């Protein structure tokens, strides 16, 4: 075969190989894209089907089934699910209501705050109100914070304690005054969590420092004093150093350790 013809032949053959490879690649991409789209549609349909199943279960006569449905629905984390759960807030079973408010807290959509506040202030069961307080701790915003402050005076210490814990999650400086008041609560857990919440707020809550110093010296509960010692290190106020140095010599090793850590923080600042 003449040289020129041989070169032309080789070029044509090479071009054909490229074209075939290109066509194969396009075919693969099209097929793969179609498969992904189909898988997405199947997944989306499965999601809708599961939501529908759980929604029906949430209305069943089986108390445990309703509780499980409420907890499972929280996985979807969207407003459509929140609406389904809101309808179940009046369930006759306290354990279902507690599961519902917990699930709403997991979804953490601000649109449910008003409904959770109603449960927090009016449900007759303590553990349901407590669950509502913890749920509101996972939803930031002034409305949620205001509701939690209101139940720092709840008649039950478990609810007051849950509110203090959740206010620590919010770390809102506007709650400094009510948290200072909660430092005198008759329940030690409430006092400890109020101190921890003030520490979470940090320097903006520094007006609590004199009260915390006094209580560090006088509170009868060891955990309260530990939380106070820890919080004083977060507030940036060196007037707490003498009280912390005294606490660093305490016979309670956990209090002493917390005080030493706070002393270091204040000195570093």
Image (tube, helix red, strand yellow):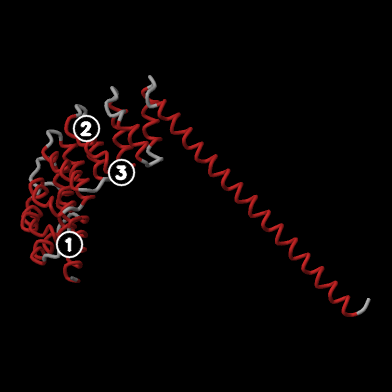
Earlier-in-chain disc, 3 versus 2: 3
x%, y% of residue 88?
31, 28
Quadrant holding the N terminus: bottom right
Q: Quadrant of residue 125?
A: top left
x%, y% of residue 150?
12, 40
Rendered residue at 24%/42% (across/down): 136
Earlier-in-chain disc, 1 versus 2: 2
Assess disc 1: are there few (<14), some (14-19) or many (≥20) residues with their C-alpha within 10 Å of its C-alpha: many
According to the picture, the residue beneath numbered tag 2 turns out to be 119
Q: Is residue 67 above or below residue 38?
A: above
According to the picture, the residue beneath numbered tag 1 turns out to be 233
Considering the numbered disc 3 on the image, is that residue within a helix, a strand or a loop?
A: loop
Q: Is residue 245 above or below residue 208?
A: below
According to the picture, the residue beneath numbered tag 3 turns out to be 108
Q: Quadrant of residue 267?
A: bottom left
In whole angstroms, how far apart are the C-alphas of marks 1 and 2? Answer: 36 Å
């Amino acid at each position: 075969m003449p040289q020129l013809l041989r070169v032309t032949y080789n070029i044509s053959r090479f071009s054909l190989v490229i074209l075939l490879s290109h066509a194969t690649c396009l075919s693969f991409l099209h097929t793969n894209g179609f498969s992904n789209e189909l898988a997405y549609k199947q997944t989306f349909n499965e999601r809708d089907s599961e939501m529908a199943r759980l929604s029906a279960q949430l209305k069943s006569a089986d108390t445990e089934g309703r509780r499980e449905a409420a907890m499972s629905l929280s996985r979807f984390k969207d407003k459509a699910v929140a609406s389904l759960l809101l309808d179940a807030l009046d369930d006759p079973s306290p354990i279902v209501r507690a599961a519902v408010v917990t699930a709403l807290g997991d979804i953490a959509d601000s649109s449910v705050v008003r409904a959770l506040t109603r449960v927090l202030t009016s449900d007759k069961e303590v553990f349901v109100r407590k669950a509502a307080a913890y749920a509101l701790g996972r939803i930031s915003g002034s409305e949620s914070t205001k509701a939690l402050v209101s139940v720092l005076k709840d008649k039950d210490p478990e609810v007051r304690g849950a509110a203090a814990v959740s206010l620590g999650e919010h770390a809102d400086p506007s709650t400094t005054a009510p948290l200072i008041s909660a430092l005198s609560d008759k329940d030690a857990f409430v006092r400890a969590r109020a101190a921890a919440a003030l520490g979470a707020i940090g320097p903006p809550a520094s007006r609590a420092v004199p009260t915390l110093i006094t209580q560090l010296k006088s509170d009868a509960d060891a955990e309260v004093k530990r939380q106070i010692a820890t919080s004083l290190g977060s507030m940036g106020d060196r007037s707490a150093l003498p009280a912390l140095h005294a606490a660093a010599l305490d016979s309670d090793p956990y209090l002493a350790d917390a005080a030493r850590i706070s002393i270091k923080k204040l000195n570093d600042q």
